[in-house]
Image (spheres, helix red, strand yellow):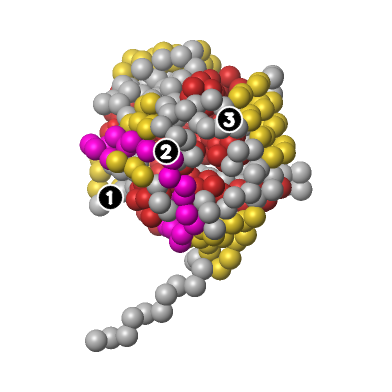
Amino acid sequence: MALEKLVVEGGRRLHGEVVVGGAKNAALPILSATLLADGTCDLGGVPRLRDVDVLARILGVLGLQIERDPLGRVQTRILSEDASTAPYELVSMMRASFCVLGPLLARRGYAKVSLPGGCAIGDRPVDLHLKGLRALGAEIKIEHGYVIARAQRLRGANIYLGGPTGCTVLGTANVMMAACLADGTTVIEHAAVEPEIEDLANFLKAMGASIDGAGSHRITIRGVRRLEGCRYDVIPDRIEAATLMMAAVATGGELLLKNVDPTHLEAVFDKLREAGVSVARNCKTVAVAAAEPLHEVELNTLPYPGFPTDLQAQMMALMCTGTGASVFTDRIFPDRLQHVSEFKRMGARILNVNNTCVVLGGSPLQGAPVMASDLRGGAALVIAGLIAQGQTEVRRVYHIDRGYEDLEGKLRALGAVIRREADELPEKPPAV
Ligand code: EPU
């Protein structure tokens, strides 16, 4: 893979309008759910992302035909159900692909899916996914790094899916998808309530599934014999929307976002307002404007409707422009802090004690070469580059491309000076 970097000239005030794309974290499970369908699924709002491309490759291996039409809609259709193995080479590139397990098992009675492995944002077990599928009657073994699941026919069950930090988003998705084709009724207790889970449930219902309570902590699924293809539009991406808001506000600018569901962003608005940002919302639009100076905030990430872990790093970049001391604790992924040392290299003053970070505002950031090591941390480094004095080079842009469609294009349209360049690898050191 050719490496690229984003070169950002700091100090430009962002302003203007932007249209938010479809939600990555809704599109990925929805694409996996098309494994359950007889007939063609026709999906709008599937963003053009590296994660979507990787999942499309996995679904291709599993016998699906996936095409994007000239209008940008994605059509999927099953050509063959002979292969039920999702290989390590692809699953290890993206954890969300573990979501093919439930649909494969429910529809084909057999699935072999690589364990996703380690992740830059910390330990991410899949025990709750497996617990839920076992409760539905699946026989599950782990052999040579693969989960091998079998079931003649899944049976509905009462399943408690709470984990050490609360709900599991993709675990709920996996079990809900499998339960759609099980005999009888499944009740998932302590289900995740993220909007992306509700969106997946709405898609499954459009295919003919019987699901009540999605969006609450108790989801009831009555199994049906078959699911049909359907036409569906993915919800807007709340994380992309908030990332762009934070970028604009960090530069002292203002932004009108279109194609947003403001009801998905209450916790974010609350924190931005606490910091002094002005937020005005309408039915499908949001306008934000910067305040000077920003007040300090105390922020804990929590499952929805709490403040999302997927925005912790971007909010931290924003609070580097504040004056007081802001306190950040990620309660979902306590180790999701790789961006902190890179912010420090740009001159940020951040103290960290036991996974809690205190950002001491009031010291201007300076442009520097920095390295993205995960998707959201990468976006946060771009925000830091926008507010820094001088030039910042954000290396390993492929992390950002996993989850943001044309981030630099959208920022450029708002007045940012940012460009993508090939990243030369340092030459091998001479042998000594
Ligand atoms: N957990 C367990 N056991 C499990 C599953 C999860 O203990 O079997 C724990 C995790 O370790 C974590 C917590 O439960 O502490 C929540 O993890 P969850 O399962 O909800 O995360 P996920 O479903 O794997 C999704 C998003 C992530 C997002 C998290 C939390 C997708 C594709 N991914 O991951 O998004 O951070 O929910 O909201 O939906 C991103 O987009 O950058 C991203 C990482």
- Indicate the secondary structure of the residue bearing disc 2: loop
Ligand 1 visible in quadrant: top left
Would you call the spot at circle 2 few (<14 residues within 10 Å), some (14-19), or many (20 or more)?
many
The front one of 149 and 57 is 57
Q: Amino acid at mark 3?
A: Ala
In the picture as drawn, the residue positioned furthest to the right comes out as 70
Asked if one can make out residue 187 in the rendered structure from this viewpoint, the answer is yes
User: Disc 2 residue type?
Assistant: Gly
Per the model, the C-alpha gap separating discs 2 and 1 is 45 Å
Q: Mark 3 and mark 1: span between their CA atoms?
A: 51 Å
Where are the magenta residues, as a range? Answer: 352-375
Please tell me whether residue 211 belongs to the stretch shown in magenta. Answer: no
SS at badge 1: loop
| Marks 2 and 1 in Cβ contact (< 8 Å) | no
The answer to whether mark 3 is within 8 Å of ligand 1 is no
Residue at the (34%, 42%) spot, across then down: 350
Q: Which residue in the protein does label 1 denote?
A: 145
Residue type (three-letter) at the residue carrying disc 1: Gly
Disc 3 to disc 2, how far (Cα)? 15 Å
Residue bearing mark 2: 361
Compared across the picture, whether 344 is left or right of 7 comes to: left
Q: Residue at x 59, y 42 (%)?
A: 251
- The disc, 3 or 1, on the residue closer to the chain's N-terminal end is 1
Query: Which of the two discs, 3 and 2, labels the residue nearer the N terminus?
Result: 3
Closest to the observer, 312 or 386: 386
Residue labelled with disc 3: 291
Q: Nearer the viewer, mark 2 or mark 1?
A: 2
Residue 272 at x, y percent in the picture: 52, 26
Instruction: Give x and y (percent) for residue 403.
Output: 53, 45
How far across and how far down the image is residue 82, in percent?
A: 48, 48
Say which mark, if any, is on residue 160.
none
